[in-house]
């Protein structure tokens, strides 16, 4: 098929690669414009743009589709279909209607649960035990379109947003290739009105750990906000981020270290597996303890 691909972050890259490997003709790749990043604040292309250019594909990155010329250029590509995954813009009806068979979206949740911006984070934060990807026929609403295909996966007690992100990205890539190859056979199933939830964008204010909360909630917070923005707490005046944890038996004052990097919560305790000191990279706590004194009875705030 002649495909317009629309995506921006790392999550979208395996999907683009899978479409190319499956033999589809990529008419054009649309992504968010390069933006200042890094210490030098130089414009940095999105991961999709970088990969598309590496594959020799044409790239466009309009700020939005309010300019009629951008809409006309999109329609002139004469595409069979558009594949959209984490593009970063709500598409107007003029864009949704331009490809012959419309626009398909790959969404990283089991719709209608977790419509919106941060479905992977929210699934872990909420303690969901399953998630997945949906191939959805796009319409003007936010993730409201009928679903053509869905694939599920379990969320393990060790999953972080990073690990689940990578798994769902690969699942989405496989699912869209399957959907395009069987499109005439697929039925569009309307989403039920019951069970709708919205995955609002993660705010950095959610990252500070309140040790009076139950260990189950703090464990989800750590895993759900890993790697970004990273759940954190203060220790001896230093902000420490936590990137992986597990639930363990134990009790003490909330925030108290009861054994190395095992920290008491309002109910139960969490063992920190991976952490990050200020100005350092994330590393196993066994390595952090070589240069940091975290003694029993000390306290995280």
Image (tube, rainbow, N blue to C red):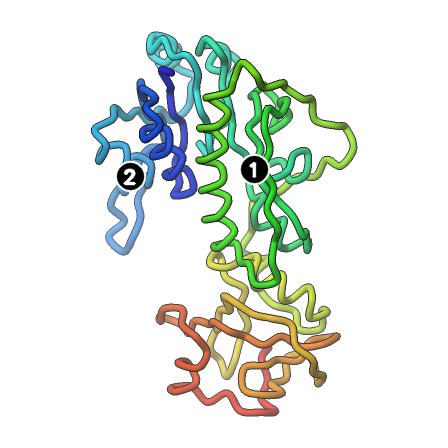
Secondary structure under badge 1?
A: strand
Q: Dot 2: few (<14), some (14–19), or many (≥20) neighbours within 10 Å?
A: some
* The disc label shown at residue 133, or none: 1
Asked whether 264 or 147 is in front, the reply is 147
- Tell me if residue 200 can be seen: no
Position of 193 relative to 2 (above/below): below
Q: Relative to residue 292, is residue 162 depicted above or below? A: above
**Residue at x 72% of width, y 76% of height:** 268
Relative to 161, say whether 36 is above or below: above
Q: Residue sitting at 43 percent across and 20 percent down?
A: 82
Q: Nearer the viewer, residue 264 or 160?
A: 160
Q: Position of residue 164 (x, y in %)?
A: 52, 51
Describe residue 177's horizontal placement relative to residue 262 as left or right: left
- Compared to 184, does 142 lie above or below? below
Q: Secondary structure at mark 2?
A: loop
Left or right placement of residue 83 versus residue 260 in this view: left
Q: Is residue 69 visible?
A: yes
Q: Quadrant of the C terminus?
A: bottom right
Which corner quadrant holds the N terminus? top left
Residue marked by disc 2: 45
Residue extending farthest right: 194
Q: Give the quadrant of residue 233.
A: bottom right
């Amino acid at each position: 098929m002649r495909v317009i691909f629309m995506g921006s972050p790392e999550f979208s890259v395996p999907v683009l690669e899978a479409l190319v490997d499956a033999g589809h003709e990529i008419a054009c790749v649309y992504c968010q414009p390069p933006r200042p990043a890094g210490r030098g604040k130089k414009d940095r292309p999105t991961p999709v743009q970088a990969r598309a250019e590496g594959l020799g594909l044409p790239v466009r990155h309009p700020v939005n589709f309010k300019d009629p010329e951008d809409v006309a250029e999109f329609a002139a590509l004469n595409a069979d279909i558009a594949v959209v995954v984490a593009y970063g813009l709500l598409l107007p009806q003029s864009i949704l209607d331009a490809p012959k068979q419309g626009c398909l979206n790959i969404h990283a949740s089991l719709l209608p649960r977790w419509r919106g911006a941060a479905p992977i984070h929210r699934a872990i934060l909420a303690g969901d035990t399953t998630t997945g990807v949906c191939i959805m026929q796009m319409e003007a609403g936010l993730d409201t379109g009928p679903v053509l295909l869905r694939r599920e996966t379990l969320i393990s007690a060790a999953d972080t947003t990073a690990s689940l992100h990578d798994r769902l990205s690969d699942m989405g890539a496989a699912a869209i290739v399957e959907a395009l190859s069987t499109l005439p056979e697929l039925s569009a199933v309307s989403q039920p009105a019951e069970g709708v939830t919205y995955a609002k964008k993660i705010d950095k204010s959610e990252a500070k750990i309140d040790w009076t909360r139950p260990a189950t909630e703090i464990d989800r917070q750590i895993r759900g906000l890993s790697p970004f923005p990273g759940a954190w707490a203060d220790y001896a005046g230093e902000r420490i981020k936590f990137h992986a944890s597990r639930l363990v038996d134990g009790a003490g004052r909330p925030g108290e270290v009861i054994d190395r990097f095992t920290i008491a919560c309002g109910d139960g305790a969490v063992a920190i597996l991976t952490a990050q000191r200020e100005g350092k990279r994330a590393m196993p706590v066994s390595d952090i303890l070589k240069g940091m004194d975290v003694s029993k009875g000390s306290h995280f705030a």
